[in-house]
Image (tube, rainbow, N blue to C red):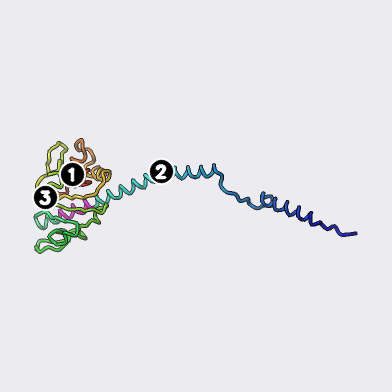
Amino acid sequence: MQPNVLSPLCNNNWDIAFMKNRKMGWLGSTAQRGFTFIELVVVIAVIALLAGVLIPNVTSVTKDAKASKILQLYDSMRTACERYYIDMGSLPIEYSGSSYNSASYHLLSLTQSSSNWKGPYIDHPLSTGDNPFDSTVYLYNSIGSHASNGFDLNGDGTDDATGTGNYLVLWGIPSDTAQFVDSALDKGNLGSDWKTSGRVEYVSSEKKLAILILDA
């Protein structure tokens, strides 16, 4: 008797069935397929939702960090000005910018000729790097035009701090950052306009923030 040998036609049919079974996963293999249109829409919607939640939070954290840097500068300069005043009996200045490299513009950071000077009172000369928005920053010792001629400390519409006094002026500061600083120093409750009352003043048109440090 002839052995039962599958014909070539039978072999082909079996191969086709085998490949079909593999494609459908009947032999334990995992079917490979792409995303459907609906699945892609769902994924995109989830990404958009997460972006809407995360991006504002990141922006807020960045804004708060820059405002905190200004507050840290205020604290360090206040301590330095107080120490300088005790030693020298006068108020210092400290200017940023390449036009002010001499020691006469850096009374807190660069060695002075007076024997009463016991500095440095800050660890480096004031520079644009101390402004979180990389713009100019100055420490003045005479309250004048850079601070609207005075500071209305009581919020009653009258400038209480005028004449001699230390105050910081920073340029390039956005309004929301300036308001954050104001809320920390003035608690945001002096007068009807936070920009013109208290220790913090702000000029929107110039993005100029002025902070009173010492009123001598």
Given residues 24 and 70, the one toward you in this image is 24
Q: Do the residues labelled 2 and 1 touch (CB within 8 Å)?
A: no
Q: In this view, does 118 lie above or below 57?
A: below
Is the N terminus in the top left, top right, bottom left or bottom right quadrant?
A: bottom right
Q: Where is residue 132 in the image (x, y as percent from the top left)?
A: 27, 52
Q: Which residue is drawn at 22% across and 38% down?
A: 189
Q: Magenta residues, as a range?
A: 73-82
| Three-letter amino acid code of the residue under disc 1 | Arg
> Which residue position holds label 3?
142
> Which residue position holds label 2?
53
Tag 3's secondary structure? strand
Q: Position of residue 58 (x, y in %)?
A: 36, 47
Tag 2's secondary structure? helix
Residue 76 among magenta residues? yes
User: Would residue 150 be found to the left or right of residue 62 on screen?
Assistant: left
Specify few, some or many for label 2: CA neighbours under 10 Å numbering under 14, 14-19, or 20 or more: few
Q: In which quarter of the image is residue 129?
A: bottom left
Sooner in the amino-acid sequence: mark 2 or mark 1: 2
Q: Position of residue 67 (x, y in %)?
A: 27, 48
Sooner in the amino-acid sequence: mark 1 or mark 3: 3
Q: Is residue 101 above or below residue 14?
A: below
Residue 35 among magenta residues? no
Q: Are marks 2 and 3 in contact (CB under 8 Å)?
A: no
Q: Residue at x 66, y 51 (%)?
A: 23
Q: Where is residue 130 in the image (x, y as percent from the top left)?
A: 24, 55
Q: Which residue is drawn at 20% across and 35% down?
A: 192
| Three-letter amino acid code of the residue under disc 3 | Ser
Tag 1's secondary structure? loop
> Which residue position holds label 1?
199
| Three-letter amino acid code of the residue under disc 2 | Val
